[in-house]
Amino acid sequence: PLGSENLLLRGATLKNTEKIFGVAIYTGMETKMALNYQSKSQKRSAVEKSMNVFLIVYLCILVSKALVNTVLKYVWQSEPFRDEPWYNQKTESERQRNLFLRAFTDFLAFMVLFNYIIPVSMYVTVEMQKFLGSYFISWDEDMFDEETGEGPLVNTSDLNEELGQVSVARFFLKG
């Protein structure tokens, strides 16, 4: 008779046995182990979410500005010999050679030129605020528990700005 002592669960290691005969039961995504296994979602604060939205908007502005300037450069240069010095005049076939590669290079040059649009210092400033905020919480003497002799323990600095935000307040009165 088979019993719980003959059961091998997922991830179990069998030692000191040459061979076994087995039957697979309870397989698939409906098993207790598979249902309990969930990937951990990352907690993101409201400030971090809004910063990511702003970053996407700034990135779209940067790409569109570089694209418009690249197109305008080639519109400006479409008139022959307008933007070239007298000593470097090229024929039309020389100007059309590798046009896509030159346009892509010009697009990347405009991206580098306008990279100030994306505020890198914003992320650095917010991260420093979170880091220092977690230390201020751990140093707060008003949060010191005299019975246990311990102060607050800050495990992460990612959610400091979410503290103290009450969205719903409920009062229960017994009469």
Image (cartoon, grey):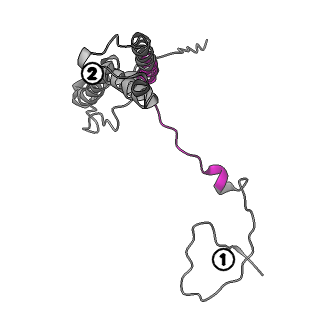
Q: Quadrant of the C terminus?
A: top right
Residue 76 screen position, x and y as percent: 40, 10
Which corner quadrant of the image does residue 119 belong to?
top left
Q: Which residue is mark 2?
A: 88
Mark 2 to mark 1 CA distance (whole Å): 88 Å
Q: Residue at x 75, y 74 (%)?
A: 23
Answer left or right for 40 relative to 93. right
Please tell me which residue lies in front, 103 or 87: 87
Q: Residue at (46%, 16%) from the top-left corner?
A: 64
Per the image, the residue denoted by label 1 is 5
Query: Considering only vertical position in the picture, is 56 above or below 154?
Result: above
Residue 41 among magenta residues: yes
Task: Using a 10 Å C-alpha cutoff, classify the residue at mark 1 as few (fewer than 14 neighbours), some (14 to 19) or many (20 or more).
Answer: few
Query: Which secondary structure, mark 1?
Result: helix
**Residue type at tag 1:** Glu
Q: Amino acid at mark 2?
A: Asn
Residue 168 appears in the picture as rendered: yes
User: What segment carries the magenta color?
Assistant: 34-61
State the residue in front, 54 or 156.
Answer: 54
State the residue in front, 161 or 116. Answer: 116
